[in-house]
Image (cartoon, coloured by chain):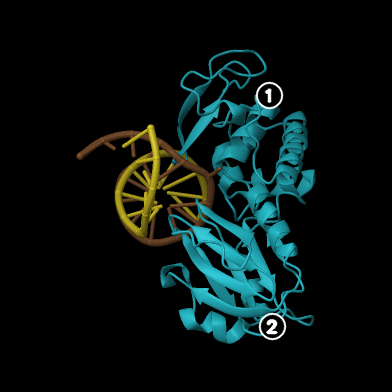
Chain colours: A cyan, B brown, C yellow
Amino acid sequence: MPELPDVEGFRRVAEGAAGRIVRSVAVRDAQVVRNAEASGFDAALRGRRLGHPRRHGKLLLLPTGSGRGFPAVLLHFGMTGMLLRTDAGDPPHPHDRVVVSLDRGELRYRDQRKLIGIALLTEQGGWQAELSRLGPDAAAIDRDELRDRLGRTRRQLKAALLDQTRVAGLGNLTVDEVLWRARLHPRTATTDLRAPDWRRLDQRLHGVVAASARAGCVPPRPSWLTGHRDERAGRCPRCATELTSGVLSGRTTVWCPSCQRA
DNA sequence: GCATATGTTAGTCC
DNA sequence: AGGACTAACATATG
């Protein structure tokens, strides 16, 4: 599930918990903890007040306190993670890996596959180190920067857009949606794009990201490519041509062979 | 058993 | 060196 739009939805969930006091942290499955002793979360966070969450790409930071914001919890949701606010005592779910009990309700990190996980950050440097590995956030990047970060080396457009060190936050669904709307074939070489291509790419990227972030997911609407990618012989919502799918960059990729010429 | 899954990364072969 | 592809991670579903 989690690409930038989904994580933006989780950020709003966490924003709803800003100002609450952490009563306890239960790490139900230590496998999701990336960098600390599982018991370190409770020790570091108990009694602290949650601050305003920050998102960059697919990363979400939950700071504490009103000052520097640390210690903080860094969350990555892999393919199946989510963050939800529940009432205290709501029935546990088997995939609840970490439960943060608050003075009102709970915050739960739920993740079926446990592909990435969470980390405890005790100082600003930890967050800076994470950010240094990522490109600018896809929601905030401008056209010149997009072109600069993607167009310097020859790569398949799909692979370049998925590369989090180039631009952070775009996932498999978002990229296919953006390329379909910009009428660009996913295998197009980044060095072959011309000015109007970059302009369309930038416009469509921001359109898709903004609408998806508002929805908290890449919405599977009938008018979007994403609404048809799982159909057996889905058709392009623009021209009704049967959609093509293939594997590119190791990911299932769907495009319209008529609208998106190689 | 096989294929698939909205992510990331290490290894291999150009 | 850099790009493309594969396998692997852990788990569930069809």
Measured from the top left, where is residue A243 in percent x and y? 53, 20
Measured from the top left, where is residue A3 in percent x and y? 60, 49
Q: Secondary structure at mark 2?
A: loop
Measured from the top left, where is residue C13 in percent x and y? 39, 40
Q: State the residue position of label 2.
A: A48
Label 1 is placed on what type of residue? Ser
Residue A190, numbered label: none
The answer to whether marks 1 and 2 mark residues whose Cβ atoms lie closer than 8 Å is no
Q: Which one is closest to the eye, mark 1 or mark 2?
A: 2
The quarter of the displayed image where residue A172 is located: top right
Identify the residue at image location x=69%, y=83%.
A48
The quadrant in which the C terminus of chain A is found is: top right
Label 2 is placed on what type of residue? Arg
Pick whichever of labels 1 and 2 is earlier in the sequence: 2
Label 2 lies in what chain? A
Identify the residue at image location x=71%, y=75%.
A50
Q: State the residue position of label 1.
A: A223
